Amino acid sequence: MFRNLFNNKISYRLTTVFAPSDVGLYSAYPESELCFHSYWDTCREQFHKKFRKNCFGFFLSVKEEHLDAVPKFIFMCENLLELNSKTKFFKTEYKNVIFIKPAAFWKSCYMRRSLFTLLCRQGIFNFIGAKFEDILFGNIDDQNNNKVDATYEFARMTKQAYLRFFCGFTKYVGAGPNYNEYFPEKHGWVEEFKNKGADYIKTVLVSDKNYNLKVKFYGNSILLS
């Protein structure tokens, strides 16, 4: 299932700044394959200003000893979603940085892009949980790691939206961000779905006719109807 996690035919290089020592930082590529690298974003939501639909890909800082954790988790997600075209991962000259070319499925929608960045950050800690559910919502009682705790806190705050999305209701039809606002990134996945009830979530996450999923991962969830 996890063969050929990295495509080593191409190597993307950091060209303007060094790799960060912390994990979970993002840096966007432009809309082409030009050799370019912007500064690191520590805030996932602020990164969305650069992670637009035409963004070629982005760098992500990870744990050097668990370089394959993010690809494994994203592949779990994409297999569950039955995506034909998958995200591609590349190593870089730094052992704690990978380059990610998101599948078209994720790039096509602002809210999917927001969720994807959250899933990538969760994937960094893939080694913590043996089961998909553990990685998705956390099994970290003994970790005492603020970054891990914050990542899973966001997932738990939006748990019902997660459940509905991974049951196949992947099309977001809500208002979305207003790019004329000073902080349009504040309208990402977490801000949209945190502590929201099923009635609201069902109105903005609907079935996408382009992706007819057969799998219903969470069985008889109230969010399926």
Image (cartoon, rainbow, N blue to C red):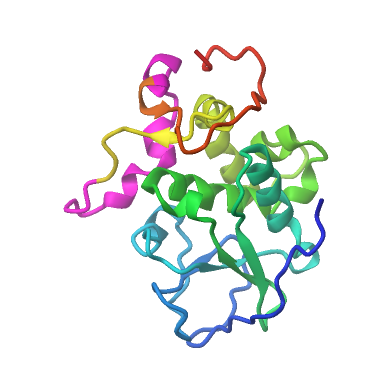
**Residue 66 at x, y percent in the picture:** 78, 62
| Residue nearest the viewer, comparing 146 with 200 | 200
Q: How many numbered badges does the structure rendering display?
A: 0
Q: Is residue 181 magenta?
A: yes
Vertical order, 26 against 189 (above or below) = below
Corner quadrant of residue 59: bottom right
Residue 13 visible? yes
Direction from residue 159 to residue 193 in the image, left or right: left
**Residue 148 at x, y percent in the picture:** 65, 47
Q: Which residue is found at the position 72% from the left and 64% from the top?
A: 63
Q: Which residue is found at the position 54% from the left and 64% from the top?
A: 25
Considering every residue shown, the one lying at the far left of the view is 180
Report the span colored magenta.
178-202
Q: Is residue 76 magenta?
A: no
| Residue nearest the viewer, comparing 72 with 124 | 72
**Residue 164 at x, y percent in the picture:** 53, 26
Q: Which residue is found at the position 37% from the left and 48% from the top?
A: 110
| Residue nearest the viewer, comparing 153 with 172 | 172
**Residue 24 at x, y percent in the picture:** 58, 60
Residue 139 visible? no
